[in-house]
Image: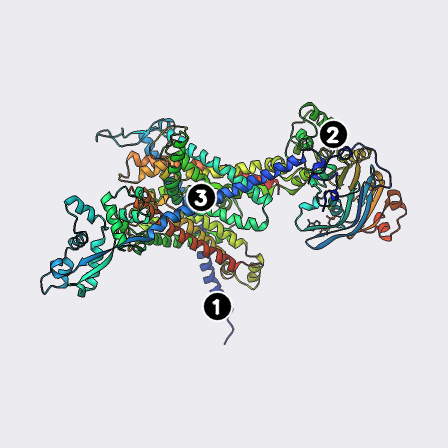
Amino acid sequence: MALTSIKDLKGRRQSQMILERAIRFCLVSCAATAVVITVGIIGSLFFEAMRFFRDVPLFDFLFGLEWSPQTALRADQVAASGSFGAVPLFAGTALTSIVALSISAPLGIFSAIYLSEYAGISTRNFIKPLLEILAGIPTVVYGFFAALVIAPALRQYGALIGLDVASESALAAGLVMGVMIIPLISSISDDIISAVPRSLREGSYGLGATKSETIRNVVLPAALPGIAGGILLATSRAVGETMIVVMAAGLAANLTANPLEAVTTVTVQIVVLLTGDQEFDSTKTLAAFALGLTLFFVTLTLNIIGNQIVRRFREQYD
Amino acid sequence: MVIPMTKEMQFSATSGLEPSPSEAHPKIHASCVHVSYSGRPAIRDVDLDIRANSVTALIGPSGCGKTTFLRCLNRMNDIIDGCEVRGNIQLDGEDIYAAGVDTVVLRRRVGMVFQKPNPFPKSIYENVAYGPRIHGLAGKGKDLDATVQSSLERAGLWDEVKDRLDAPATGLSGGQQQRLCIARAIAIEPDVILMDEPCSALDPIATARIEELIDELKQNFTIIIVTHSMQQAARVSQYTAFFHMGELVEEGETKVIFTNPKDPRTEAYVTGRIG
Amino acid sequence: MTDQAYPPNLVTDAVPGVRKRHGKEIRFRLLGLSAILASLGFLVFFVASIVITGYGAFVKTVVLVDVDLSQEALGLEAGYTSTDLEDVSYRTVVRGAIRGMFADVSGRSARRELTGLLGAGAEFELKDIVLKNPELVGSQQSFWMTASDDFDLFNKGGAKEETATQLTPQQKDWYRGLLRDGRVKTAFNADFLTASDSRDPELAGVWGAIKGSFFALGICLLLSFTVGVLAAIYLEEFAPKNRWTSFLEVNINNLAAVPSITYGLLGLAIFLGIFGLPRSASLVGGMVLALMTLPTIIISSRVALQAVPPSIREAALGIGASHIQAVFHHVVPLALPGMLTGTIIGMARALGETAPLLMIGMVAFIADAPSSVLDPASALPVQVYLWADSPERAFAEKTAGAILVLLAFLVLMNLAAVILRKRFEKRW
Ligand SMILES: Nc1ncnc2c1ncn2[C@@H]1O[C@H](COP(=O)(O)OP(=O)(O)OP(=O)(O)O)[C@@H](O)[C@H]1O
Ligand SMILES: [Mg+2]
């Protein structure tokens, strides 16, 4: 068999180059999908929301106190399809998130403290995955649990001490959501606490401090900024959570700061507006996109700031 | 386990300002100290007595076990996983590794200053007040202020920071931070202060200040200092111990070690031929 | 050892206040431990209550009914054909049978209560049996037939008086009579796994939802795995380090944290609104889930690629392979197990996701299992949502049962990921 001629090699090399070009193009376009998705999200939300704001002024949407998007009673009431003041939704979202965080922040942070400072390696390796299970359970399951078990229990025990708890309440939804977020907070806090340099702890032990004194007075203050970043990320999760609130917080807008009452949230209203019978172009459906746009920007902001803080914290002690 | 508290004990527990016992009773007595990290020996068979109200320098090439030995003296090695300490170390005649010893009590009496300044991320005031606070030494307000001031004064930092006690300690310069750490250590009035290369990160002026400080402090405290600088050891210490590859090669009065060492390794080291 | 052996100046009590501080130490530690125990306790409580509630979905109450299958009772004339057999009014036969067992019952309402003991599907069960075994015609038979949902709940709830408000006292008496005669038992409810959704709780099953989820996940896997892995390969192996790639990176990280419902809105506006794809189809569901899982898969695939040591690339380049050959022949195969692990975990998340599917209309009541990705379909988590919303009490246990099926799939997927990771865990 003759040796491959130089010319042959050149030809093969050329066809291979073309193939490699094609592959490279394919790779780049796959990576660009991420940008396409972002553009798609922002574009579709923005476009539909703009159409909504043609009917309802932005100011009325952001600062209006009444939310009742029911369509007009008479066919000729075109624009009068209800009121779209989103403040009760923002308040409801804030209320459920606050309840959730007041459960998950202490439990998550204390779990992280125990895991990173007290638990042995084997305990840690055993408990961490168990906690992660909480984050892996589908939210619809949490929602069902909140509605089936937690809400009736709250109602019952509330009645015992003379509190009137609604059958759907911000408290029930927030409690369960809080449990869902525990692993998120505990794993970020765990990372952050472990990143606090050993020399700080030793400085405190060297003065005769006990472990808990060291943790409370030295480790936690040092870790606080990082943990705060983690809590922002958790807030973003809570704000964007949908199924739990749909199933346990309530559907009717209700401007209240009382967690024992039913409230509705931004995500719940998106679901309410878009499920069931509807024409696609009504102000009602467009309102869902306006809410979606708000949600997107709020969660994005929380994420960007949260990530920034966590990253800066890590760099600080690198 | 309840031990009746005698007057004498209480006296001894806060005896930082007391004059030293006689030479016959060393402040710290270490014998046959072996330390290993996860089974790998770091120091072997170290016997060393530390005299009270003096400065003892630990010298030796890098990795010879100076820090390891120093950290045995207030049981800081306890918090390192896999570190095992054998042998006998006594503080004022009491075995510090005996059952029932509380490391909190021990470290309250044997303070430590680390190689790299490690101020807490708090204000200057809070850094110094931290020790007295956790130990309940000075109440609040005036008393604590006085303790903080006198500690900072003794550490030679007061004039530089008296106007910004509430500023974060991390904003101080390296030398100031190290002096702050010393102030923090002396604020709890320990008997013994362990210093692990306290000047390694400092410029000559800051170093000179700290050396001055050590000289003053030895009137009230027993000081053990690890250093890589022969000149520093010669300047500040009365006694010197030379470590080499995990062994204590030679110890004695600083003058003798530097001018007339018995062991050829010591001589080679102090004259700069090994290390 | 006596107390005397302790060094008196170094024990806890040598310094006042230290004992109290140790007490605080222990309390603090307990606080941490109780935070963990509270979280885990919730998990246990949660799983236990789902299992206890959902267990009932897998068993059903059956009643032994004596059925007269004589030709007269079936209304058949001599020389009947199999078509005639199909046209028999089995409903009447079943009613007759149950009334026959309680001959003393009379009156319209009492009779209606009596037929209320059996489920709505009883006539079909009988029809199935007769059509399969035509030789039974002309004989007297006893069959175990599915009881109605109220009766089922009453039986499974231990026949406590307060559990079944739906049943009349008389129905409860009948139940006790049947029980005494050994005519009531519970049996495995295969229908729950093989049937699709139904308005009647005792007929409803999860098969349609499983199939819908399967279709959607298949589409999701196809799209997100190929695109995600290729994107990761580009970013990790080929991309120059410049503004554009760092923008891409930030973009991907932020997409991973966008609320899932937003992806549903995107799907609604673009896939349904612009492309005009069918509503409620698992195709669209899969596409939306793919967008949602893509960032996760890109991130975990990059981690897997980073774990392949540079020496492998250098070795391949050293023997004259082109950059692309080095990556696709040598690096990617080594990173594949890691990528697959990340993908499985992403798929598990997609399987449990509900909100985006609601947006694209996968919430309709669908009684038939979908046969293609374009058919209107439900999905397991959506089925959970629909049933949880339903007012009939019997659906509560169906919901929990569907959750158990969903959790079983999730456990299997995560187990697969763990095994894959263990198996291919390489130390370079
Ligand atoms: N935490 C640790 N884990 C394992 N080995 C250690 C640890 N700390 C020290 N060692 C080992 O013990 C030996 C002595 O270390 P040590 O830190 O005491 O040296 P040193 O004399 O203080 O050195 P240097 O002058 O560089 O500070 C070294 O071989 C070191 O590798
Ligand atoms: Mg050292």
Q: CB of residue at label 1: within 8 Å of ligand 1?
A: no
Circles 1 and 3: CB distance less than 8 Å? no
Q: Amino acid at mark 2?
A: Ser
Checking the image for residue B151, the label placed there is 2
Q: Residue at x 56, y 49 (%)?
A: A123
Q: Amino acid at mark 1?
A: Asp
For label 1, the SS is: helix
Q: Residue furthest toward the top?
A: B142
Instruction: Tell which of B65 and C338 is nearer to you.
Output: B65
Residue C132, image x, y percentages: 21, 63
| Closer mark to the observer between disc 3 and disc 2 | 2
Residue ID for mark 3:
C255
Left or right position of C411 against A251: right
In contact (CB < 8 Å): disc 1 and disc 2: no
Question: Which circle, 1 or 3, is nearer the viewer?
Answer: 3
| Residue A68 appears anywhere in the view | yes
Relative to B269, is C335 on the left or the right?
left
Q: Tell me where residue A252 appears, x and y as whole percent.
A: 33, 32
Q: Which residue is mark 1?
A: A8
Q: Chain of mark 2?
A: B
Residue at the (37%, 45%) spot, across then down: C354
Letter of the chain that mark 1 sits on in the rendering = A
